[in-house]
Image (cartoon, rainbow, N blue to C red):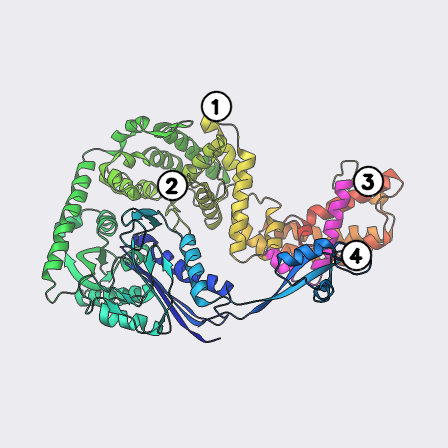
Amino acid sequence: MMSQNLLVELFVEELPPKALKKLGQAFAGQLADQLRLLGLVSTTSVVTPFASPRRLAAHITDVAAKAADKTVAQKLMPVSVGLDANGRATPALLKKLQALGADVSDPAFAVAALRKAPDGKADALFFDSLVGGATLDLGLQKALEDTLAKLPIPKVMSYQLESNCELPGWSSVNFVRPAHGLVALHGSTVVPVKVLGLTAGNTTQGHRFEALKSPVLLSHADHYAQTLRADGAVIASFDERRADIVDQLAQAAAQVGGACRPIEDDALLDEVTALVERPHVLVCQFESQFLEVPQECLILTMKANQKYFPLLDAKGRLTERFLVVSNINPDDASAVIGGNERVVRPRLADAKFFFDQDRKKSLDSRVVGLDKVVYHNKLGTQGERMQRVCSIARSIASLLEQADRPGYDPGLLAQAELAARLAKTDLLTDMVGEFPELQGIMGGYYARHDGLSEEVAQAIEDHYKPRFAGDVLPRNPTGLVVALADKLETLVGMFGIGNLPTGDKDPFALRRHALGLIRMLSEKDLPLALDALVAAAVPAFGSKITDPSAALIDFVFDRLAGTLREQGYSALEVDAVLALRPPHLGDVGKRLAAVRAFAALPEAPALAAANKRISNILKKSEVAVDAHVSTVLLQEPAELALFDTLQKVLPQARAQFDAGDYAGALQTLAALRVPVDAFFEGVMVNAEAPDLRLNRLGLLKTLFEAMNRVADLSRLAA
């Protein structure tokens, strides 16, 4: 069949910018998938998505005008039902064939055309027919309808058609935005499809103000991007437009000089790319007096409200210059620059006003106000929550003190309690009320203004960290304690009232809190056991919750397992280590490395299998077994040899384990392979004499405990 490249464009009113990139990819991908299912697109076809503020389009190579015919096999019924004892067609078979359009005027001929084939336990009759391939006209119509129905539209609009409907102005259409044009070109030929009340043609619209031609005539599917750029002043490709903006931002920053650079923000870059059809970057500036305001406030208001790119100097400090991505390119840009400068000034003035007003009250004076802010109807106010965080922070600081780690600061408890008491007070400030994203950050600034120590100010600023994957951890021990306490309070409280994540719903970000807890305990190698932390947090809630310790610890270890698998560890390795519930998460990485090294040893498979066998034997024992061996009861040479080897290797393995040399400990224990194999070949564990049986079980229990201090090696057995 003749193949040509296909271009489909849907021209609409301005699409939601935060959804444009996803919509463009989905439109092209879904359309190609639907055509592929119909046999109109080959496996080698290349799909190119286009997305601009007012269009979604797809260019697909090697699209057939008609799909190839194909043979379809349809199962009819079992042979025993379709044929009688003489092999003639039964009435049921003839009726089925007639329903399928087969010629049954000669039943014998009809039966001869059928195919017998095994189907489960019995043979069945199959009817093979040749089905004509779909044409592009019909196939594209269906593919377009299915594609539009499956688009990830954030919110659907309803609007009335003005033409191509029975009652103009009355027929309603549902789509993300009103659609005004449809292009469908197979090579240079228009494919006559209709969707959303539109009939496909070969013309579209370019830039609202700068298009050289209106409408823009598209002569061929392959000329779409070039024609739209030349005649319509539109860069149709989202990726090309984004790359163009990046280049222009860098050039504009270089022109400003001073090693300035635009702020890096992929989400902002994607959103701005979705707002312009042909970008043009301009340099603007504001009064330097606004730089007295914390730069986070100024940056946020410029990004969030105006979609500007602030410029930072070589040291990462905000400058009074900022970059604007304009959708027009006038000969004289002064009016555009002046307009943007006038627009940003009131925003920055508001930020300065909020900052000045907030500093008139200390954080300490705001503490009482937390009692008036509801946190959760079952868990009380923010004031009550603050008291719980303080209590948990005190407990964590005490646990760290008991660990007696070198470098412990004896003033940690007092600093952590102070930071925990003030950490939520910036929620009551005007700045955080206007910009909730600045909570914590503004608390740090206001703490410094109040004369508090840098340790406490950083702790207040950092107590929400890590806020997302890849975020930095709190910078100092006080911040770590308060961040741990804050996340534990949320986790224990929500689990304690049964408010758990379900599916993809996690309104209180409990998964993120658990991952933050894991990262702090692991990466900072804190000497804090997870169960001890949870146990220390539960009493802070009094009677408001039921103890969720078991479920919460399972939840955290589930999150840890998922994280480790994402890091490249196998499910067997992760399962072997986490089966022991290591008390200190900082050890998990070393344990995994040790397990991986052990698994590479030639002795590993046999020892893992033996471990699994020992585990099963001990589980089936009808009496409690202690790791105790009486040398008097050792009779068989194989059990004597195993005991002697254990006596030789255990002291070294224990010393290595206690020193944190987990890989060395497992390497040492690998010497047990030969005596273990000999033991199972030459010794009857379940001896008839009870004392012999119990002694041999004790020997196995000693072996099992020795080998499974680093990980449950039985989990490595195939």
* Lower position in the chain sequence, tag 1 or tag 2: 2
Q: Which residue is mark 2?
A: 478
Residue 619 within the segment the image draws in magenta: yes
Indicate the amino acid at tag 3. Answer: Leu
The x, y position of residue 527, in whole percent, is 50, 43
The alpha-carbon separation of the residues under discs 1 and 2 comes to 29 Å
Label 4: which secondary element: loop
Label 3: which secondary element: helix
* Mark 2 crowd level (few <14, some 14–19, many ≥20, 10 Å Cα): many
Q: Which residue is mark 1?
A: 543
Q: What span is in magenta?
A: 594-620
* Whether residue 251 is visible: yes
Whether residue 68 is situated above or below residue 632 in the rendered picture:
below
Indicate the amino acid at tag 1. Answer: Ser
Tell which residue pokes out farthest to the top in this image: 543
The alpha-carbon separation of the residues under discs 1 and 4 comes to 77 Å
Query: Residue 24, located in which quarter of the rendered image?
Result: bottom left
Residue 718 within the segment the image draws in magenta: no
* Lower position in the chain sequence, tag 1 or tag 3: 1
The x, y position of residue 53, in whole percent, is 28, 58
Tell which residue pokes out farthest to the front in this image: 105
Label 1: which secondary element: helix
Label 2: which secondary element: helix
